[in-house]
Image (spheres, rainbow, N blue to C red):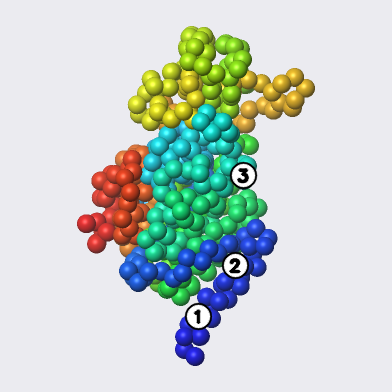
Amino acid sequence: MARAVRLFPWLLLCLFCAAYAQDGSVITADHGPNAAAQLNKHYVVLVSLDGFRYDYARKYGAPHMLAIAAHGASAPDGMIPAYPSLTFPNHYTIVTGLYPEHHGIVGNQFYDPARKERYSYTDPKTSTDGSWYGGTPLWSLAEQQGMRSACFFWPGSEAKIAGQRPTYYLHYDDKYPDARRIDQVIAWLRLPAAQRPHLITLYYANVDHAGHEFGPDSPQVAEAVKHVDALVGTLEQDLDALHLPIDLIVVSDHGMEKIQGSWINLDRFAPLDGFVTVGTFLYAPSEAGANAAYQKLKAADASFMVYRRVNVPAELHFNGNPREGDPVIVARGPYAIRAQAPPPGAQDRAPMVGNHGFDPFMMPNMKAVFYAEGPDIRHGVKLKPFENVNVYPLIVKILELDSPPVDGSLNVLSGILTGPAAH
């Protein structure tokens, strides 16, 4: 009878998840309970605030995040996103510790010359197909080692990657109520210890949406910043009430900049006949075609740099994957660049007011945020800007998992750890 009483909350949650799976919400993958070795480990709740620029908390007032910075760890001058500073590449970098050219998600949309297929983050046929994704995301690493995980949205979390899916996950729904996302996170953490996920991801796109539509200096962005900050405050309060050893880590994927001017179409400067093009990505039909386009483009316009792929500057880590195209275009400023305009008769749109994707070393407003607090985090640590590939080894250390080789290093963030996690 006692065993039945202990299992009852778990059975209720399974019924809850099954009901929601029918309408596109929580899905449960039966991976069994946490392994005995995982039961007493700490918990990590990783929150992404898409498009939350590094200076927004001070610029617009985000008291809850600034409070985390005061009694936890933060990067006041920002966390450096991987190039290109786009949503899918950087979210997936954060959870794999790999640069985009190594994990393979080199853009929100791109072409794979070997597969002869296009990847698009908006197409479930590709975004949920694990064969596009390299590396071992945190949730897959945890599941491989007998630790349960949960993803309330995160790019890649709907795909089976490295042989695993999270125990609990959802199909992405931008309209899912913000407060209910937190309710679900807390419900997961109230499960019996055997079923309770030790790694949870949570995602909000509000600030990114406002930045694209109205620009980073708009009152709409200010309002969105205050809204997600209040959500972080609610989450923090609800986590504290659980009295569990939980580390809360709040990040973003990139910043935002106001776009200058109208579209710059690359085919004005070089013929792209026979090329496959996706945004600014150029996939030449031959080596001769790639070199001819490069020669035309390199002297074409002051708004961008052009490189043969092997010669892209080393700090961008964007010179070794055919998915990156060749030649490679790197904007010099906040310009709207594309391969070509839509064909005659097709609808064209003006560039978004705000955008990202630019070189973070050239454009500081691409930098993201990093805040962390919890039993494993030292108080009041201010970090210099660091690359986001280093978040992965930090979380792996807190969860005491065995890590595959990655581009990030624990040495970069080990100074924020306290207690057993610091060793």
- Choose the circle earlier in sequence order: 3 or 2: 2
- Determine whether 82 is above or below 372 in the image: above
Mark 3 to mark 2 CA distance (whole Å): 23 Å
Mark 1 to mark 3 CA distance (whole Å): 37 Å
Residue at (46, 53) in percent of width and height: 163
Residue assigned mark 2: 17
Amino acid at dot 3: Lys
Relative image position of residue 121 (x, y in whole percent): 58, 41
- Determine whether 106 is above or below 271 in the image: below
Q: Secondary structure at mark 2?
A: helix
Residue nearest the viewer, comparing 399 with 127: 127
Q: Crowding near pointer 1: few (<14 within 10 Å), some, many (20+)?
A: some
Q: Secondary structure at mark 1?
A: helix
Q: Nearer the viewer, mark 3 or mark 2?
A: 3
Whether residue 359 is visible here, answered yes or no, is yes
Residue assigned mark 3: 125
Q: Secondary structure at mark 3?
A: helix
Q: Crowding near pointer 3: few (<14 within 10 Å), some, many (20+)?
A: few
Relative image position of residue 176 (x, y in whole percent): 63, 56
Residue nearest the viewer, comparing 6 with 387: 6
Residue assigned mark 1: 7
Q: Crowding near pointer 2: few (<14 within 10 Å), some, many (20+)?
A: some
